[in-house]
Image: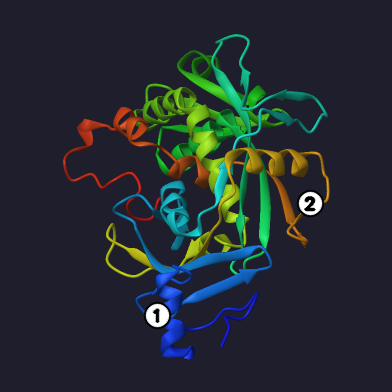
Amino acid sequence: MALPENKVVRLDELPLEKQVDALKKQMVAVLGDGQVFVKRTPTGAIKAVKSVVTLSEANGEIAVIQGKAMTTGKGFYRANQIANLSIITPEKLTLPTGQVVVNPFPVVDPESQTLRKVWVKKMAIGCGPTGNLVITTATLLYDINMYFIQDLMKKVTKNSGAGRICLETMLTEEEKKTGIFYKIDGNMGVWANTSHAEILKAIDTFINKKNFAERNAQTIAERLAMAKHPALSHIAYVNFQGPDYKRVAKEVIIGYVNDDNPNTLMDLAAKAERGEEITVNGQRVDIINVTAEASVDDIAVEADDEEKAATAHPEEGASQQPVLGGDLF
């Protein structure tokens, strides 16, 4: 009995001698639940692995926002240890205006000479659950100013004396001296009292988001590229269990091992960027492109350990919960 081509089989469906032969040749991997995946192509065998990955809130791998658990960059990186997607950073990216720029591309505020926005492009290359090769491309805008405005909005609506929503023409002379005004649309905007403790925290967070903008933008773009790939798209939002700050999610991940070298991957990425139709071993490669702006939730949850340490407020006491713990909003 020969192993079938392009088919997933169970080890226990094979005769004993074939089971031993397959194991000796490392054509299969025995999994905890007894299932073994073997996918053969005309050019050889691609080995598949199936595993249940546990994502932990305590480890920053999921973040619960308004009752929904979102998988963070850390969570996707953990799941990708099984999915085996290759993350590529192209040298250039094309802005919506058609301008071709370096990747990542920082947008600097001319007055403060600090970052206002970051454009970044990432690609994820690998097999989907059925073994077909898929390339996803994510072009992301990380707008720090918009995050700051929305953070100020939350502060002024939830804290008395922190500020108000108004027209710029409604500001008093005293308010102009004691606060800041950010426009939302036309002359409407948010005025924030810079002597208020919550507004000072928002400004502190804003500064740190600027300092770590490029790093966090790349993490979000990589997460987006993986989230759009069929191998990991099902874990963008997950069902969780457990008490607050210790919630976990368990997700089944299928990954394929291939022998493509970095040069081959870069060649595939370049063809995808040019919009060429790609075939590998006679099979058409699916290409998925997405352009998005980092949401408030994205920016809030994607903070590396260095940024979280810089943003911590010791005066809040030892009882403060972790940044990624609990419902963030």
Mark 2, mark 1: which one is toward the viewer? Answer: 1
Name the residue located 46 percent from the left edge and 42 percent from the top edge: 300
Q: Position of residue 290 (x, y in %)?
A: 71, 48
Relative vertical location of residue 251 with respect to residue 106 in this rendering, above or below:
below
Compute the Cα span from label 2 to label 1: 37 Å
Q: Identify residue type, mark 2.
A: Ile
Q: Position of residue 293 (x, y in %)?
A: 64, 41
Task: Please give the residue where the numbered disc 1 appears in the rendered image.
Answer: 20
Between 138 and 318, the residue placed more toward the observer is 138
Relative vertical location of residue 29 with respect to residue 43 in this rendering, above or below:
below
Relative vertical location of residue 2 with respect to residue 140 in this rendering, above or below:
below
Q: Which mark is residue 129?
A: none
Which colour assignment does the render follow? rainbow
Q: Identify residue type, mark 1.
A: Val
Binning the other alpha carbons within 10 Å of mark 2 as few (below 14), some (14 to 19) or many (20 upward) gives: some
Can I make out residue 295 in this image? Answer: no
Q: Secondary structure at mark 2?
A: loop
Question: Viewed as shown, does residue 317 lie left or right of 283?
Answer: left
Sequence-wise, the earlier of marks 2 and 1 is: 1
Quadrant of the drawing holding the N terminus: bottom right
Q: Secondary structure at mark 1?
A: helix
Binning the other alpha carbons within 10 Å of mark 1 as few (below 14), some (14 to 19) or many (20 upward) gives: few
- Quarter where residue 138 is shown: top right
Q: Position of residue 129 (x, y in %)?
A: 58, 68
Name the residue located 27 percent from the left edge and 32 percent from the top edge: 313
- Whether label 2 touches label 1, CB < 8 Å: no
Question: Viewed as shown, does residue 110 lie left or right of 219?
Answer: right
Between 112 and 306, the residue placed more toward the observer is 306
Task: Please give the residue where the numbered disc 2 appears in the rendered image.
Answer: 278
